[in-house]
Image (cartoon, rainbow, N blue to C red):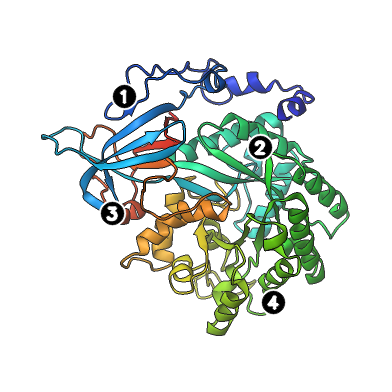
């Protein structure tokens, strides 16, 4: 579908992907499986024709099936090497056994943890500040209004090739960091039509062996306010009906008034139920004690629409929610009670929350006294309240977040300071917030920081393969969360994936 759509714009998807911004127009052939790169043991069975007969339209090697990950460290035994047996056929870890005591080796064991996940990433707005097509649109100020205005203007210039280029940049950097699952927001409205959605479908298909890209059609613009509201609403509904789209997202706070914002919430939830999708809100993005939190309307609507019985297996994500940072003890108790058995996951987005929040009012000065900040205290929410909370990157390289990278562990490291979470067990929670908890939030199987038999062989190993040099080894989760380093080995579904 995406290829046909792009063809109507004169774009040959295969040709475009084979040359797009990667420095070569010829895809690399699949690597031989007869000489695996040490120290990992490769499955020497020839790859299935269904997965390898068609060359990847970008110059990254095919995933290499693995049968063993020898001499790795696990969170439960950071000093004793183990061997993992993998099945590329079932994509599972089939056995974990102690590794034979080695003689002195040049290949020190690497720490193995569950792979990373983006629970909230904007695919179509990534790297606007790096693409020459938008170089004239650098925001004049660092305010939310400036970011919104320049990004709205940029959207009028979106083209399929530009969307594919920037999307590939984002996904390549994400996979290199260890991301194997991602909820990617793609907008649909009267400005871009379904162009972002179809580009997202093309990228979803292209990266399917490296990363599971779950698409969320996103209503960034009002759907009940302004002259384009009805058109925006119709386009989101059209996209939500597509099989490749798994979630419906909206931004109630952009509506003109509180009544329209509540209509936005009700519409998005009903649309998600009707189309059997997850729902994902950008919600309560303010630090105004006088603003009524919209989270109460969301929870009430979910119960009124019988979400758990009418839309089983689908989750609810609430992103930003900075207004909750002003909650007192009674409000938090009320929130915990009203969430109860609902599959609600709160998504903290500290990179953009801290950048956008706390701006002094006009005439209040710039010195810092009036720069209160706020973001979800995810560790406290998980450990003290038992709520489901995770961390996301949100935006990369645009006016909403002109700093930070696509590495989810960057958000986890930031949260150590923001959440003052440096105590015993905090690092494990933060890692789960960008890994297994994040996967659960977007509808995949969750888990903990531990690596266990029978679980998915979606893994990341931290350190330089083969050792060498003066690089400090990371042997604990705490060290990875504090500073993960840049060398990582990524395994998805029992196969080694490489993006370089």
Give the residue displayed 64% in from the left and 20% down from the top: 14
Q: State the CA–CA distance, disc 1 to disc 2.
A: 33 Å
Q: Residue lying farthest bottom?
A: 330
**As displayed, is residue 152 above or below residue 25?**
below
Give the residue displayed 42% in from the left and 51% down from the top: 409
Residue 447: horizontal and vertical position, in percent?
44, 54
Asked if one can make out residue 158 in the rendered structure from this viewpoint, the answer is no
Check disc 3 and report its element: helix, strand or loop. Answer: loop
Give the residue displayed 11% in from the left and 35% down from the top: 104
Residue 247: horizontal and vertical position, in percent?
68, 49
In this picture, residue 287 sits left or right of residue 405: right
Within 10 Å of disc 2 (Cα), the crowding (few <14, some 14-19, many 20+) is many
Residue under circle 2?
200
Mark 3 or mark 4, earlier in chain? 3
Mark 4 or mark 2, earlier in chain? 2
Q: Residue 76, labelled with which disc? A: 3
In this picture, residue 159 sits left or right of residue 468: right
Q: Residue 292, labelled with which disc? A: 4
Mark 3 in CB contact with mark 4 (< 8 angstroms)? no
Within 10 Å of disc 3 (Cα), the crowding (few <14, some 14-19, many 20+) is few
Q: State the CA–CA distance, disc 4 to disc 1.
A: 57 Å
């Amino acid at each position: 579908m995406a290829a046909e759509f792009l063809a109507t714009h004169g774009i040959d998807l295969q040709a475009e992907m084979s040359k797009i911004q990667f420095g070569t127009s010829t895809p690399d052939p699949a690597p031989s499986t007869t000489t695996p790169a040490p120290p990992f043991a490769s499955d020497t069975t020839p790859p299935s024709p269904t997965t390898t007969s068609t060359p990847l339209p970008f110059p990254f090697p095919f995933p290499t099936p693995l049968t063993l990950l020898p001499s790795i460290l696990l969170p439960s035994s950071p000093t004793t090497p183990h061997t993992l047996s993998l099945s590329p056929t079932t994509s599972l870890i089939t056995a974990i056994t102690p590794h034979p005591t080695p003689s002195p080796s040049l290949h020190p064991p690497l720490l193995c943890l569950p792979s990373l996940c983006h629970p909230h990433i904007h695919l179509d707005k990534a790297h606007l500040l790096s693409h020459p097509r938008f170089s004239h649109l650098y925001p004049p100020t660092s305010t939310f209004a400036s970011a919104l205005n320049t990004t709205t203007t940029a959207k009028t210039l979106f083209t399929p090739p530009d969307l594919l280029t920037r999307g590939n940049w984002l996904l390549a950097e994400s996979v290199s960091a260890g991301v194997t699952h991602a909820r990617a927001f793609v907008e649909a409205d009267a400005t871009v039509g379904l162009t972002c959605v179809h580009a997202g479908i093309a990228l979803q298909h292209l990266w399917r062996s490296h990363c599971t890209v779950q698409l969320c059609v996103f209503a960034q613009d009002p759907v009940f306010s302004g002259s384009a509201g009805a058109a925006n609403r119709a386009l989101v509904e059209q996209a939500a009906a597509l099989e490749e789209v798994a979630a419906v997202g909206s931004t109630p706070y952009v509506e003109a008034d509180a009544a329209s914002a509540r209509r936005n919430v009700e519409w998005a939830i009903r649309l998600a139920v009707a189309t059997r999708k997850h729902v994902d809100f950008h919600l309560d993005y303010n630090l105004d004690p006088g603003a009524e939190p919209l989270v109460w309307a969301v929870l009430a609507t979910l119960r009124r629409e019988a979400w758990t019985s009418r839309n089983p297996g689908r989750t609810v994500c609430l992103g930003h929610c900075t207004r909750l940072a002003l909650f007192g003890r009674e409000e938090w108790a009320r929130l915990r009670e009203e969430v109860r058995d609902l599959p609600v996951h709160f998504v903290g987005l500290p990179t953009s929350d801290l950048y956008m929040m706390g701006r002094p009012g006009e005439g209040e000065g710039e010195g810092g006294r009036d720069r209160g900040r706020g973001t979800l205290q995810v560790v406290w929410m998980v450990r003290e309240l038992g709520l489901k909370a995770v961390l996301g990157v949100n935006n990369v390289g645009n006016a909403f977040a002109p700093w930070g990278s696509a590495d989810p562990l960057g958000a986890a490291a930031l949260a150590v300071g923001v959440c003052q979470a440096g105590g015993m067990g905090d690092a494990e929670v933060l890692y789960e917030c960008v890994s297994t908890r994040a996967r659960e939030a977007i509808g995949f199987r969750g888990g903990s920081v531990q690596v266990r038999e029978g679980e998915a062989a979606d893994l990341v190993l931290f350190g330089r393969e083969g050792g060498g040099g003066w690089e400090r080894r990371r042997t604990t989760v705490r060290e990875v969360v504090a500073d993960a380093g840049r060398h990582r080995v990524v395994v998805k579904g029992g196969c080694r994936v490489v993006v370089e």
